[in-house]
Structure formats: C-alpha cells, structure tokens
C-alpha cells in the first residue's frame, strides 16, 4: 500500500523549524503557494512558532492587494531576514504591504538582490558551491560600494566585490535552504509534481534541490492528487524523490484574479482577436515609438510598465509574429499579458523554468530589452526600483539587473516628467498645456538600478523614449535625437531637465504618424537596417 505524502496546510506549517531558512517559489500571484504560507502565519499567531525565519524569494511572493504571499509571514518575531528579487507594492504609499512596513521600521533585515542571481544561489546551494561570482549588479545599488542591496540600517553587509582572473566581480555567498515551499498543479501519491495548469514552473526544481542537498524538507502545494506513478514522466517537473509532503488546495488560482486559462499554460491557443487594442493616448504614443526600435526576427525581452504595451502595438499593426518575446518568468513567444497576469503569455511557444530563462537573459542571448524608467541622471544611471516617497524600501530590482547587464540594445520608455500634467494630442502634434512638477531627468537618481557609465564602457546601445522626445546615451551624455511635433526643444525638453542635455547635430522630428489614432502601417526592418 502506498504511503501518502498528502497532509493539511496546518500540518505542513508544523514542519517548519525555528530559525529555518525557507525558500518560496512564486512570482507575485503567479505560482504562489498561498495556502501553506497562510498556515505558517496562522501557526505563529497562535503559538509563537516558528520564529526567526529567513525567507528567500527569487521573485516577489504575493501581489499588491490584501494579505497574501509574504505578508502572511510579515509578523514581528516570525520573520527575521528576507532575501527577495522584488517586493509587492501597495495600492498607495499610505497603504504599503505588511512586509514593507516591517522593513521601513527596521524590524527585520532585508536584501533586494537580482532575481537571476537568487536562482543561481539556489543552484550553488544544491551543488555545495560557496556562492555566485557574477558581473550582474556591478555599479548599481546591489554593489556594496553603493548600498549592497541592503534595504535598511539593521541589515548587515552580504554582497562582496572580488577580483578574479583579472576581472572585477560581485560575490553572493550561498544561503543554505532548510525548507522549500513550491507549487505545482498535480501530485501523485509518491510526490511527483506536474505543472500543466501553471503559467510557469518558476524555480521550483532548483529550490527543491537546494533544500534536499542541505538535509531540509520540500513542501509542494498542488491543486489535485493522482494515483501513484500515473503521471506522464515527461510532464513531471519535480520528481517525488525530492518532495517530502504535499498540500492540496483545490481553489488555488493560476495567478491573481485568474482561476485557470489554458492559453496561459500553453495547452490551448486562444485567438488574439480577443485582445483589445491599447487606447490612443500618450502611453500608446510612447509604446509605438519604442516598437519602431524593433526588427524582424528579433528576440525581445519585455519588462513592466509602458513597455508592456508594445506587443499590443505590434498586434494592431499586424506584425506581432515578427518578433519573439522572452519574459523572465519563463514564457518564450506568444503574446505577453499586462496587469496582474504580467509574467504570463497567451499561446507561448515554450515555457522554461525561470532559472533557465535567466541564463539566456544574463548572457545577452537576445536582441533588445524593452524596459521602463523612473529617473535618469547626469551619468545616464537609471532608477527603476526606488519608488518616490517610500523611504528606502523599494519595489525591487527583480530581473532588471540580470537583463540589462549584457543586453546589446536597451529601450527605456516613460514620461519625460512625473506628477499631474495636461498634454493634448491634436492634428498630429503634442500641445503641452501644463507639465508635471516632478522632474525625471535629475542630477542624481534616488537609486542606481542601471549603470550608465558601465553601459557606455561596454558599448551597449541605450535608447530612451518619451512622449516628447527620443534620447540616446552617448559617451558625452544623454543626447536628444528626436523631438515631437509641436514641442519646443528649449522650453519643453532642455529646460525641463535638471541637468544639461546634449542635442544631436542630426536632430529630427518624431514620426507624425505616432500622434494620430489610426494604425501606423508599421513595417519592421530586417536586422541591420535600423538607423
């Protein structure tokens, strides 16, 4: 008779020892083992145990609304230290998630490290290696010569600078894992885990291996249980030899607000005619101009923010199949989604584990990255992690540092200024009625998430697209190369930056078609044809 590994969430919570290091597989609402995390929080609230936990999250666990994910554990005394690639953001600065309140109050130690590096740290833990040597994060806030990824004053130094083989590296020591809490769709009675309903497998296998090699335990949350050895071997993502206990939550969501969509799991191809086009306005104008940086056949990484509208632009223009999107959570190809479903894609060609996807991204094995920005300073440094008005607690670097470290071409999209603004689009021109009162081109960014000087030294091509101008990062500084029709270069661009911008000797006007609601009739050039 088969001895079942299935237990309740409360019984799983009882297995977490005092002072344990717990690795949690999740990407916001995608793949979050929320039932197990909730049970751990309930156990602590009623018994005071387990206390003093360290948690490791390669990507954020839990979304921005309600007590979910890491917020179940965000109780004084329960959580001692946290390593995370990103942190959930509340609906406003006045209503932050519980974990951010603990960090801001210096009640826990907290690190913000690149997601890809955190996955590599699990692999080093699984193989008994001392840590990770990488150039990812050099000269950013992750570099100990800046902030070392530390999020408050009680957090000790962790990242080190090392010199090896004539090069400079950042060194991230291995963090041994005692408990891995992962998620899948189906477990058989032996603990073999498949992920047929998941939007991505994330890093579940690596996290399970890290716990197993350290003599720890692996708890897998799933939607259902199958008979022993009845699951197709090719579909098993985490073998039962690594899984100690299984918790069944038949109500687990595929991702926030989505119970299950087979098109996100790659088991059904949904007609893209269902996708609504982006509404015409300033954000669509920016996304359209960013799309003009792409070429046919390109492999393109996509980030959050305005850049996430670019696939909708290509779909409207009938050229969405001319590029292949790669998203850090794992999807390759298909149509990337926005909002709570970001990290998933409709109709993907493949879905890799996040750890393997980051190998592609860190290597620069793609053509273009389409990202966003909050601030840009005199050196071309970009802040995308530190939100305004939120002390030292950040939304997090996520995969941004992994993606930008070796990317050949980076396109950063965003508004030229922040704050309340009134800008009309009329007859193919912009009309600036009132501008935002918060500059985004500042003397010094609040946090260096991307190093401009390293980009220049490495020969990376950096394009910044805004509603009123396009800029390139050159050795002599940020240079205006295009200006929108209807915009005065001196008054609306140069005078609105907190430092002198360079102006290209070949300054041109942005394509007037961008500022009209009808489709552009965009034709992507072949690689090498881009100006």
Image (cartoon, grey):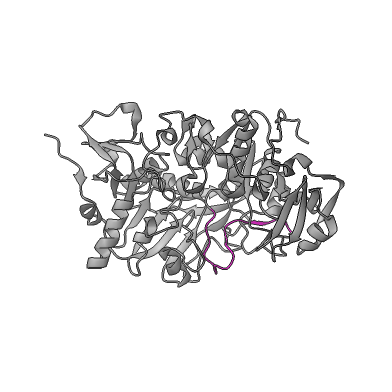
Horizontal side of 182 relative to 383 (left or right) equals left
Asked whether the viewer can see residue 393, the reply is yes
Q: Residue at x 46, y 56 (%)?
A: 84
Q: Residue at x 71, y 31 (%)?
A: 521
Quadrant including the N terminus: top left
Majority secondary structure in the magenta region: loop
Residue 77: x %, y % from top left: 33, 69
**Which quadrant of the figure has residue 196?**
top left
- Total number of numbered discs in the rendering: 0
In the rendered image, the vertical position of residue 155 relative to residue 17, given as above or below? below
Q: Residue at x 42, y 39 (%)?
A: 199
In the rendered image, the vertical position of residue 300 relative to residue 451, given as above or below? above
Residue 420: x %, y % from top left: 66, 63
Judged from this view, the residue extending furthest toward the left is 1
Asked whether the viewer can see residue 334, the reply is no
- Of residue 441 and residue 115, the one placed in the foreground of this image is 441
Horizontal side of 207 relative to 315 (left or right) equals left
Residue 352: x %, y % from top left: 46, 35
**Which quadrant of the figure has residue 364?**
top right
Residue 182: x %, y % from top left: 34, 46
- Of residue 444 and residue 269, the one placed in the foreground of this image is 269
Residue range (magenta): 379-397
- Of residue 73 and residue 305, the one placed in the foreground of this image is 305
Is residue 389 magenta-colored? yes
Quadrant including the C terminus: top right
Q: Residue at x 60, y 42 (%)?
A: 278
Judged from this view, the residue extending furthest toward the front is 427
Is residue 316 magenta-colored? no
């Amino acid at each position: 008779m088969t001895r079942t590994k299935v237990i309740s969430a409360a019984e799983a919570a009882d297995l977490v020892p005092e002072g344990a290091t717990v690795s949690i597989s999740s990407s916001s609402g995608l793949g979050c083992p929320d039932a197990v995390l909730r049970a751990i929080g309930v156990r602590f609230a009623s018994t005071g145990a387990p206390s003093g936990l360290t948690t490791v999250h390669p990507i954020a666990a839990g979304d921005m609304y309600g007590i979910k994910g890491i917020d179940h554990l965000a109780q004084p005394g329960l959580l001692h230290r946290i390593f995370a690639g990103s942190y959930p953001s509340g609906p406003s600065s006045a209503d932050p998630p519980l974990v951010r309140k603990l960090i801001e109050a210096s009640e826990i130690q907290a690190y913000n490290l690149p997601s890809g590096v955190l996955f590599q740290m699990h692999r080093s833990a699984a193989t008994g290696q001392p840590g990770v040597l990488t150039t990812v994060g050099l000269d950013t806030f992750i570099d100990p010569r800046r902030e070392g990824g530390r999020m408050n004053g009680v957090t000790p130094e962790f990242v080190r600078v090392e010199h090896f083989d004539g090069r400079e590296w950042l060194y991230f020591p291995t963090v041994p894992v005692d408990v891995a809490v992962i998620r899948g769709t189906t477990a058989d009675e032996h603990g073999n885990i498949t992920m047929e309903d998941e939007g991505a497998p994330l890093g579940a296998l690596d996290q399970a291996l890290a716990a197993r090699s350290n003599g720890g335990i692996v708890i897998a949350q799933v939607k259902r249980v199958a008979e022993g050895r009845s699951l197709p071997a090719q579909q098993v993502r985490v073998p039962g030899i690594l899984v100690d206990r299984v918790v069944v939550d038949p109500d687990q969501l595929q991702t926030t607000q989505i119970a299950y969509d087979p098109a996100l799991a790659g088991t059904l191809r949904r007609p893209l005619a269902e996708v609504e086009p982006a509404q015409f306005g300033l954000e669509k104008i920016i996304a359209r101009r960013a799309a003009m940086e792409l070429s046919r056949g390109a492999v393109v990484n996509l980030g959050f923010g305005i850049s996430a509208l670019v696939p909708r632009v290509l779909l409207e223009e009938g050229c969405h199949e001319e590029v292949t999107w790669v998203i850090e959570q794992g999807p390759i190809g298909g149509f990337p989604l926005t909002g709570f479903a970001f990290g998933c894609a409709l109709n993907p060609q493949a879905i890799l584990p996040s750890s393997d996807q980051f190998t592609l991204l860190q290597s620069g094995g793609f053509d273009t990255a389409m990202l966003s920005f909050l601030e840009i300073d005199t050196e071309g440094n970009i802040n995308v992690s530190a939100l305004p008005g939120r002390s030292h607690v950040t939304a997090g670097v996520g995969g941004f540092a992994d993606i930008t470290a070796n990317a050949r071409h980076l396109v950063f999209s965003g508004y030229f200024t922040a704050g309340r603004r009134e800008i009309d689009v009329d007859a193919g021109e912009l009309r600036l009625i009132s501008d935002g009162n918060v500059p985004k081109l500042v003397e010094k960014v609040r946090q260096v998430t991307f190093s401009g000087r390293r980009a220049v030294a490495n020969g990376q091509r950096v394009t910044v697209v805004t509603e009123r101008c396009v800029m390139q990062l050159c050795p002599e500084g940020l240079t205006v190369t295009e200006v929108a029709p209807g915009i005065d270069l001196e008054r609306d661009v140069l005078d609105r930056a907190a430092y002198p911008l360079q102006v290209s000797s070949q300054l041109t006007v942005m394509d007037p078609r961008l500022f009209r609601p009808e489709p552009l009739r965009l034709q992507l050039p072949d690689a090498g044809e881009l100006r």
